[in-house]
Every structure is written in structure tokens, then in C-alpha cells.
Amino acid sequence: MFFGGRGGGFPFGDFEDMPGMGGPRGPPKEVDNTKFYKVLGVEKDAEYSAIKKAYFKLARTHHPDRGGDKEKFQEIQQAYEVLSDREKREAYDRYGEDGLKEGGGGGGMDDLLSQMFGGGGRRQQQGPKKGKPVMHPLKCTLEEIYSGKTTKIAVNRERICTICNGLGGKEGAVQKCTTCRGRGIVTRMTQLGPGMYSQSQGPCDDCRGKGEVIDEANKCQ
């Protein structure tokens, strides 16, 4: 049996013309992957330290508690959250904000391998910290559950520090941990017997797995 076609094979033409078979595609969609860099005022090849420094400076200037614009501050936070995370930044550089909506940079095996072999895992997600949820038990009767009741309570809650914006110290105070060399993980050797050793990895005790330390004199109160 003979199959015709341009390639001398398939009667319906080449496979490459069929949907999903690598056929002709339209022009690639232009990706806007510069917005967040412009928001922080850094170059696309900027290192994390430069991104963090730029964020720190802008956050202090535009913080709502200091009279700054709330929307502008949120834009700065969003830009820092993406660019300070290695995987989110890679997704943004390739696909723009669409890559973030589709779950780009969501971790997975890369994070697991990174944690096992010293990459620090998702430690780089160092955006503004959120306070813990506040829970307060209340006693009420069955009747109050059905009819409803309004009660005033007073609770203590944690707030993001307006001085350091949750970073933990003054500008430039955060330094790379010298014990783990910024990885957050250290390798330990345990002697099991003559000439026998066991190797294991675990969080660095000096920086508590963060990879960064702040001198006591520069810690924010």
C-alpha cells in the first residue's frame, strides 16, 4: 500500500501540520519581564544583596505608616517577593507575570535536592514577614450561638516592625553566616568506629538554617 503526501509517507500531509505535532506556530508572544526590576530600580542581572538593599530603601520611604502610598508599597512588596525567590524569579524572567499565575517557581524536586546538597532550598523566600494568626477562646451559651452575641475583647498581637520592615536589623546589618557560608546547612561527620564515619546534613546552629546572621549590636529592638 502506498501513502502519498509531500514527504512521500502520510496521505494527509506531514505530521508537522497537524495540531500538537510541532506544526507551524504563530509569532511568539512578547513577554514583559522588566516591570518588577523597574519597580525596585535594579538591573535584570542584579544579585540578591542589591535587590534586598533596594527593597529596604524603598520600603522605608513608601511605608504607609510613614505617610507613603499604600498601593505603591504593595507593588514594591510584590516585586521583592518575586525577585528575592530564585524559582519565582526564573519563572518571571522567562514568562513574565503569566509564569507566576501558572505556578511558576513552585519548588518541587529542585528544592528537595537543593536542601540535601547545600543549595539552601527555599530559604531565599525572604519577603516581608507576616504575623501569626491571633486566636482567643470565648465562652458562650447555646442560646447565644443561635441568636448571636457581640463581645469586646483585648488581645496582644505581633506587628511588622516599621523600622526594619520585618528584616530584623538595620540596613546592611544582615550578613552571610560564616559557619555554613550562607547555605543554612552544615555537614557533620560522626565516627562509628576505626576508619568508619557517617556523614549527615542538618540546619546550621549559628544561623538556625537561615544562612544569614545579624550582629547583636545591630539587631532591631
Image (cartoon, grey):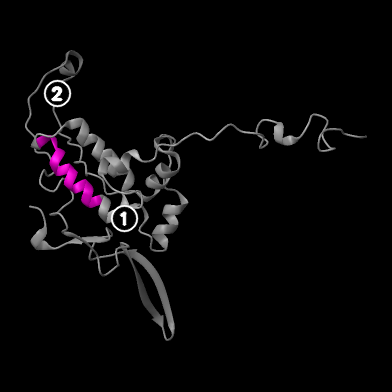
Does 167 sit above or below residue 201?
Answer: above
Q: Which residues make up the magenta segment?
A: 52-65
Give amino acid for label 2. Answer: Cys
- Residue 43, how many percent across, how many down? 32, 49
* Residue 135 visible (yes or no): yes
Q: Name the image quarter holding residue 138.
A: top left
- Badge 2 crowding class, 10 Å Cα cut-off, few under 14, some 14 to 19, many 20 or more, is few
Q: Tell me the tag on residue 47.
A: 1
Give amino acid for label 1. Answer: Glu
Left or right, 18 with respect to 207, comes to right
Q: Name the image quarter holding residue 41.
A: top left
Name the one closer to the observer, 140 or 15.
Answer: 15
**What's the distance in space between the residues labelled 1 and 2, CA to CA?**
55 Å
- Residue 189, how many percent across, how many down? 37, 75
Q: Tell me the tag on residue 140.
A: 2
* Residue 159 visible (yes or no): no
- Residue 72, how many percent across, how many down? 21, 34
Q: Residue at x 24, y 65 (%)?
A: 177
